[in-house]
Image (cartoon, rainbow, N blue to C red):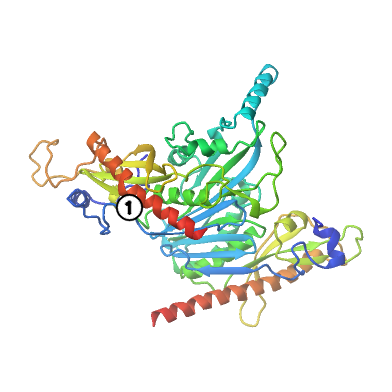
Amino acid sequence: MPLDTTSTYSTTLLRLDGRRWNELRKISASISTQPTADGSSLVTTGNTSVVCTITGPREGRGQGDRTNAIVDTDINIAPFAQLDRRRVGRTDKRVQELQTTISQAFQAHLFTHLYPRSSILISLTVLSLDGGLLSTCLNAASIALIDAGVPMPSILASITTGTIIPTDNSLSRPEPVLDLNNAEEVELPFMNLATVRGQTGSEDQISVLLMETRVQMSEANNPLEIMLRIGLDGCAQVRSHLEEVIRRHGRRMTQGRR
Amino acid sequence: MPASASTSQLSPAELSYLHSSLSSHPPIRPDARLPTDFRPFSAETNVLPNTMGSAHVGFADGREAVVGVRAEVERTAQVAAGSDAREDDTEMGDTGDSKTERAQGKSSWISLTLTLPGLRDDDPGLFFLEEMLREVLVVPSSTTSTTTAAAAGSLQDGLVINSRWHWRLHIDVVLISPPEGSAAGSYPLPLLSMAIHLALRDTRIPRLKSEGEEDPLADDDWEASVHLYAKPGKSRCFAAGVPPITLLVMVVGGNVVFDPNGTELAVADGVFAVSIARAGSENDLVSILAVRMLETSARDTFKGVPRNEGGNEWDVVPGVWRPKLGGVKRAVLTKVMKAVLGDVGKEIVGSLEAFVVQGG
């Protein structure tokens, strides 16, 4: 059995886990998973699962901003989440960077001006991690914030995209892949992409773009452009999926009330 | 460490009312439970894909604990080379002759980590709680007064593979809860203990293809794996009996109250963490493994001021709250032990057994 995508993809056009280039892993999401939290969600993408609880909007103690709510994020990666057991501390640089990224994304996206002098805390617990950490966290936080009733213009949906650049022939086209798992993230250059829906009639807008790996640029086929293009489509797919989750929950709520 | 995570938000008058209702006969609890009633919880096992055993336990107050258990092979530290090697050889010969003498495991082979929201990683209370939950798992076999202990031994003895290798067990607990203040911050000990118990009973260790002193080689077939703790109907296991359970018991005015919630803990005269395990193979025998006294949070409360302020400051006015100083009479401690060893302990062990048998 081959252990890397690069050597076999050109012949089989199948990835290691048997998916095509544009196939997403199975996403299962639910909201209101924790009855006592203001908002909560559980999002599972393949083997990655993240629990999110929202605290707020509530009075922010010592919060300086008098016109907006402040969004804070707390990520906690369980020691048993990865394949090799590793304890990720709260002071880990990578985790802190992800926390800032998520906070900033929602600070700009939510209607925070409706809650002056308040704070919104997003607590994320990663129970199982197999690639797509930031994307799953963003998706989980997005629908948990809807559960908490924080107004926002549209669901912020996120996905990872990568490219397979053939090593033997530099002139051949780089192949894009969507929704990478851990094995592919180690091997391929990839980016995290999150979009929000634009105004009616206009395109989706990118709100988060994070790329931590190097990619070889060529003038004929720009891999960055290809990754962005299929990433936008992937985000739209994820968004429609999450919207369906919210609608289903709403239907169940209204049925229960009758 | 106080037994309640957050300091009490109750006024002295409320504390006094709560204390007197809890110390009446029979005690009246704020949530109308009997003194031996536990809070309802939901549990599921085998929930995480990357672990060898996992459990998810949720209490009705919204707090959930997720436990994942992992085992990995580790090289046993040799005491010294040279002259000691010969002694090792002779010891090996001894064990070969009589299988009754089993190799001794080290308690440090079992590690337990807790992740609680809102606590720093180096919080002293966290370490205290971790060690309290861990120490009862590693009770050496000689102190357990059971007859079956000789058959499979205690947990750490079961982790020995051969003289050079052993299994290392990592138990990781993550508590998901709304931050304190929203719900009455109760001590999470019963929740964590229950979750660890169920996860350990779900844990399976891969079967080894290697034998004797060979380097360990695991069998790929997960179906052939061996349960860490004995399952009914399965003969092979690593440790005898069942994992221990730690109960939170509170004493108020001579009454023994089980599984107190955060509000009740605020007026406790004394708080105990009692670890119990099933003694022997019979379900109806329970033994106490460890008892710890926890600091009561009633110590940090403010005292009430009597209406007529003329009296001495140290006079005890009935109905006026005074912070508890801790300390429990021997007779009360005996009462706690009797209650744990009586019907309550049996019922808990029995109901958890029923859950595991049904789930498995």
From the viewer's perspective, tell me whether residue A220 is left or right of residue B37.
right
Q: Position of residue A216 (x, y in %)?
A: 83, 58
Q: Residue at x 22, y 49 (%)?
A: B15
From the viewer's perspective, tell me whether residue B331 is left or right of residue B352.
left
Q: Which residue is drawn at 77% across and 69% down?
A: A21
Which element type, helix, strand or loop, lies under badge 1? Answer: loop
Name the outermost residue toward the top. B83
Residue A122 can be seen, yes or no: no
Q: Quarter of the image holding residue A163?
A: bottom right
Instruction: Please give the chain letter of the residue carrying mark 1.
Output: B
Crowding at label 1, few (<14), some or many (≥20) Cα neighbours within 10 Å?
A: many
Q: Where is residue A118 in the image (x, y as percent from the top left)?
A: 43, 61
Residue B191 can be seen, yes or no: yes
The residue where tag 1 is placed is B261
Dot 1 amino acid type: Asn
Q: Which residue is drawn at 77% across and 70% down?
A: A20
Q: Residue at x 42, y 43 (%)?
A: B277
Q: Nearer the viewer, residue A51 or A95?
A: A51
Q: Where is residue A140 in the image (x, y as percent from the top left)?
A: 56, 64
Q: Which of A15 and A156 is in front in this view?
A: A15
From the viewer's perspective, tell me whether residue A176 is left or right of residue B56.
right
Q: How many labels does the image show?
A: 1
